[in-house]
Image (cartoon, rainbow, N blue to C red):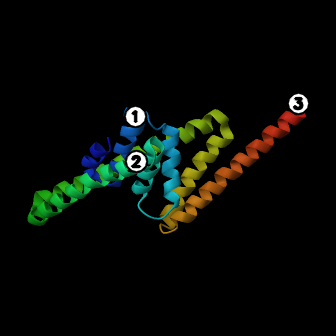
Amino acid sequence: MWTAVGIQSFGGGSATLALIRKAFVDSSGLVTPEEFSRDWGLVQIAPGINLFALTILIGRRTGGAAGIAVGLIGLLTPSIAATIVLTALYAHIAQVPWVHAALRGIVPATVGIGIAMGIQTLAPSASEAKREGVFPLLTCIAILLAAVLAERAAPTAVVFILIAGGLLGACETAIRLRRSESKSEGTQ
């Protein structure tokens, strides 16, 4: 499974993320959509290569230390081989006009994959918020919009945006739990 993910990961981080999700959430069911979204959110907090961190989390959950090793080998080996071959090939055809035209098409395709992955990753949180009521759903939407605007205003502040999103989510939950406790005390 990991080798297939690595072999097909020519499209960049979004494509690889989509393939990892497809392999472990959609095809095998080894990871739930909620676990995948939570893990992807978690690895965004730490600096570094997020796909490695996600691979380690999923590998540990599905196979312990051996799962981590197999996951990293499966993620890296085909990607390294493909990168070497494609780099050597590109060096020979870099000035061909159709290559530049093809690359202009790859960029929007990659962005499209990223948007699709964003929607799939957000869906479990949005569904849970919707089940819990209007306030959590509105909070989820507000955090999403605020993160987009904040990232556009200060692209280097990603860690602060993630921390702020986490704090807003925690505050919303605390407020909702207090309201729930107050209502249950009032009915007793």
Q: Which residue is mark 3?
A: 187
User: Spatial distance from mark 3 to mark 2, Cα to Cα?
Assistant: 53 Å
Amino acid type for the residue under numbered disc 3 = Thr
SS under mark 2: helix
- Nearer to me, 36 or 130: 36
Residue under the image location 88 percent in, 30 percent down: 187
Q: Is residue 31 visible from the viewing direction of this image? A: yes
Residue 21 point in image, percent of width and height: 40, 42
Labels 2, 1: front one: 2
Amino acid type for the residue under numbered disc 2 = Ala
Residue 26, numbered label: 1
Labels 1, 3: front one: 1
User: Spatial distance from mark 1 to mark 3, Cα to Cα?
Assistant: 43 Å
SS under mark 1: helix
SS under mark 3: loop
Residue 122 point in image, percent of width and height: 50, 44
Residue under the image location 41 percent in, 45 percent down: 117
Q: Is residue 112 visible from the viewing direction of this image? A: no
- Nearer to me, 35 or 167: 35
Labels 3, 2: front one: 2
User: How many callouts does the rendering have?
Assistant: 3
Q: Which residue is mark 2?
A: 66
Q: Which of pointers 2 and 1 lies earlier in the amino acid sequence?
A: 1
Dots 3, 2 in contact, CB < 8 A: no
